[in-house]
Image (cartoon, rainbow, N blue to C red):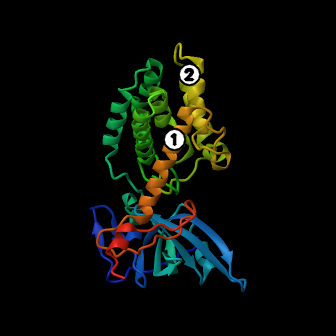
């Protein structure tokens, strides 16, 4: 593979930990329109397109721990395209532009980066809450479950050291919501808390079943998504999806448990395969009893609120637009309320 080499400009500083020297990272959330940058990114996606004149260009999605940004290579696209693949780190020289109210990089030069040139922690987003605290909170909630079969099932996972450590690394989704290390644990705990609160309002609900379903509803993502940079899908994740994988994970465990009630297992399985609500959203069955209906809406609430927060939260020291970029998942732009109230227009 041919190599394109270029030096960092004088504005870019160096860090050294004694073994590795790497360039100070320019993060996605620091990008300002019109500035020229030379920095590193992880390549989350790479596609080749053609202009109306038939000229090839590269269409990239680049990311770091603060977010993702699209990048375009208009000149020498074929030559630069030979330099790297999806899943690589690259060093780029680019200008920050704005496209549809969001940053976009016009890339002039690039090359594949060496692993010794990047700090891996700069590229994996993490939960704002310590995963250890999230795990402690989940175990505290599990302690309140009274049904011995459901409590035993929960404990068999959450007190398994290997499972617990892996759970701290998995996001709740690749691109939509809770897209950070520990995101799955954070999301599952939040959904369980919503369900717990609503059980005080709707007192005829089976709290133990509902909390168990909430904690386990996305457990299939443990096999669906890699906890590595880029959070890509596994082969079995692509082929089966997290609802089927979640059903498999729970059934494998329940089959090893003595005297677990078959009908209770069936109700729990239904919570897993119906939590997305509608077939077009990924549900294998629509929710067919009260707890299943509530779980679907609790899951939807937490996912949508996390997505809305990511679109509209003010970043310290940075002037924010009143309206967010367009969200294809919400099918709208969102008002940044704080920026709106500060606006003197």
Q: Position of residue 277 (x, y in %)?
A: 60, 43
SS at badge 1: helix
Q: Position of residue 251 (x, y in %)?
A: 58, 27
**Where does the C terminus fall, quadrant-wise?**
bottom left
SS at badge 2: helix
Q: Quadrant of residue 22?
A: bottom left
Q: Residue at x 47, y 19 (%)?
A: 149
What residue sits right under mark 1 in the picture?
222
Q: Quadrant of residue 211?
A: top left
Q: Residue at x 60, y 25 (%)?
A: 266
- Left or right: 81, with 299 as reference point: right
Label 1: few (<14), some or many (≥20) within 10 Å?
Answer: many
Dot 1 or dot 2: first in sequence order is: 1
Q: How many marks?
A: 2
Q: Which residue is nearer to you in this view: 70 or 113?
A: 70
What residue sits right under mark 2 in the picture?
264
Label 2: few (<14), some or many (≥20) within 10 Å?
Answer: few
Of labels 1 and 2, the one closer to you: 2
Q: Position of residue 163 (x, y in %)?
A: 44, 34
Q: Does residue 227 appear in the picture of this structure?
A: no
- Left or right: 26, with 262 as reference point: left
Q: Quadrant of residue 55?
A: bottom right
Q: Residue at x 57, y 63 (%)?
A: 331
Q: CA distance from mark 1 to mark 2?
A: 23 Å
Q: Which residue is nearer to you in this view: 71 or 118?
A: 71
**Where does the N terminus fall, quadrant-wise?**
bottom right
Q: Residue at x 56, y 35 (%)?
A: 292
Q: Position of residue 63 (x, y in %)?
A: 47, 65
Q: Where 137 sits versus 314, above or below?
A: above
- Left or right: 266, with 65 as reference point: right
Q: Where 178 sits versus 101, above or below?
A: above
Q: Which residue is nearer to you in this view: 139 or 182?
A: 139
């Amino acid at each position: 593979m041919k190599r394109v080499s270029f030096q960092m400009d004088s504005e870019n500083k160096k860090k050294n930990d004694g073994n590795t020297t790497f360039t100070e990272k320019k993060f996605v959330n620091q990008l300002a329109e019109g500035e020229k940058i030379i920095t590193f990114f992880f390549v989350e996606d790479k596609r080749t397109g053609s202009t109306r004149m038939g000229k090839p260009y590269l269409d990239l999605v680049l990311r770091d721990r603060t977010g993702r940004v699209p990048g375009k290579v208009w000149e020498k696209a074929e030559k630069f395209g030979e330099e790297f693949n999806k899943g690589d780190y690259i060093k780029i020289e680019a200008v920050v532009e704005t496209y549809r109210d969001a940053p976009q990089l016009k890339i002039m030069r690039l090359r594949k980066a060496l692993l010794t040139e990047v700090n891996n922690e700069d590229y994996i987003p993490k939960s704002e809450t310590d995963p250890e605290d999230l795990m402690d909170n989940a175990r505290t909630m599990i302690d309140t479950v009274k049904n011995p079969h459901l409590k035993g099932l929960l404990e068999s996972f959450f007190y398994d050291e290997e499972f617990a450590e892996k759970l701290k690394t998995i996001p709740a989704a690749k691109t939509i919501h809770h897209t950070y290390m520990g995101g799955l644990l954070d999301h599952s705990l939040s959904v369980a808390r919503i369900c717990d609160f609503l059980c005080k309002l709707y007192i005829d609900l089976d709290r133990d079943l509902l909390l168990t379903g909430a904690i386990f509803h996305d457990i299939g993502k443990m096999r669906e998504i890699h906890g590595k940079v880029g959070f890509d899908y596994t082969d079995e994740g692509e082929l089966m999806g997290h609802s089927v994988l979640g059903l498999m994970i729970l059934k494998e465990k329940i089959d090893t448990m003595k005297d677990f009630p078959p009908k209770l297992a069936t109700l729990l399985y239904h919570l897993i395969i119906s939590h997305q609500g509608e077939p077009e959203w990924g549900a294998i069955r629509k929710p067919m009893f009260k707890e299943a209906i509530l779980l679907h809406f609790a899951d939807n609430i937490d996912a949508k609120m996390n997505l809305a927060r990511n679109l509209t939260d003010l970043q310290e020291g940075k002037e924010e637009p009143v309206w967010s970029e367009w969200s294809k998942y919400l099918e709208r732009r969102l008002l940044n309320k704080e920026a709106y109230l500060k606006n003197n227009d």
